[in-house]
Amino acid sequence: MRMALSFFLIAFLIFFMPVPAGSQGTATQVETPPPPAGVFNLTLQQTKAYSKSLNFEVVGHNYFKVEWRTPYAKLVGLGSGFNTPRVYDGIAYLGGYAGPPTLYGVIVADVHDPENIKPLAFIPCNAGARCPYVRVNTKRQILIGTHDTNTDNPVQPPAGQAVRAGVSFTDVSDPGNPKPLGFLLTRENGATHGFEIDDRYVYACANTPQSKTGVTGANQELVIVDYSDARNPKLVSTLHIKGQHV
């Protein structure tokens, strides 16, 4: 029986390095892919052969070379990079990563059959932002994400408009047809980073209109957001240390 957290390999794998097939013990023996094939063009069997494992099995593999990738990713032949995969009841929520800049949004995918992974939908980041951090309230079927100003996003706001950094809420009761619910702006052109949730609150790192600028790092504090009404989220509390505010 596979472990409860069945490991399907979602690529692209930035740090994946092939090793000689002879070092894989009982792994399936395959020939090294000839050029121009490389670590971003392996089949499932090749991935298994070149992967080391301990008490888990690679059961699926997908580079997610989808249409929503950036022009850069398409030009150099990369798949989608992900930061925080979340999988519930056979549906994966995959936050696109920006280093290198391959995907600015969240892919929703059907992974019930890990050998036949199917992208279902794409939820883009706000213009001029990255949104690699995601959480899912499975009880309420709400996808939550943070939007962080990023100049590498090929989709930028119109001239004169600010990036809307903050926390978004999306209805994923129908995974193939996600619908936006609400958004809480933390700061225009601001930074909003990692977070956790419970059934009512989001606990996120972000800067606010009171945060000092021109200091080392993004100068983020704790913001607590009440999303009991996800269509109208409210900032209920913040916590900062001395010196962070203007």
Image (cartoon, grey):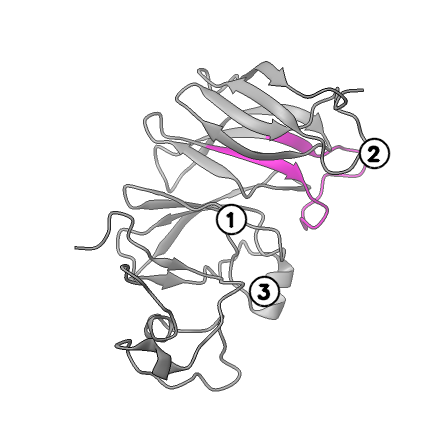
Q: Secondary structure at mark 3?
A: helix
Q: Secondary structure at mark 2?
A: loop
**Is 150 colored magenta in this rendering?**
yes
- Name the residue tied to disc 3: 74
Q: CA distance from mark 3 to mark 1?
A: 19 Å
Residue 196 in the image: above or below residue 106: above
Q: Residue at x 35, y 83 (%)?
A: 22
The reply, left or right, for residue 128 in relation to residue 182 is: right
Residue 225, quarter of the rendered image: top right
Which amino acid, by three-letter code, is at mark 3?
Lys
Between residue 236 and residue 156, name the one nearer to us. Answer: 236
The reply, left or right, for residue 1 in relation to residue 236 is: left
Residue 145 pos. (x, y %): 52, 34
Which amino acid, by three-letter code, is at mark 1?
Asn
Residue 58 pos. (x, y %): 31, 63
Residue 175 in the image: above or below residue 153: above
- Name the residue tied to disc 1: 83
Prevailing secondary structure of the magenta residues? loop
Q: CA distance from mark 2 to mark 1?
A: 27 Å
How many labels were placed on the picture?
A: 3
Q: Which residues are magenta?
A: 144-166
Residue 42, quarter of the rendered image: bottom left
Between residue 34 and residue 119, name the one nearer to us. Answer: 34
Number of the front mark, 2 or 3:
2
Residue 234 pos. (x, y %): 56, 15
Query: Which mark identifies residue 214?
Result: 2
Name the N-terminal-most of marks 2 and 1: 1
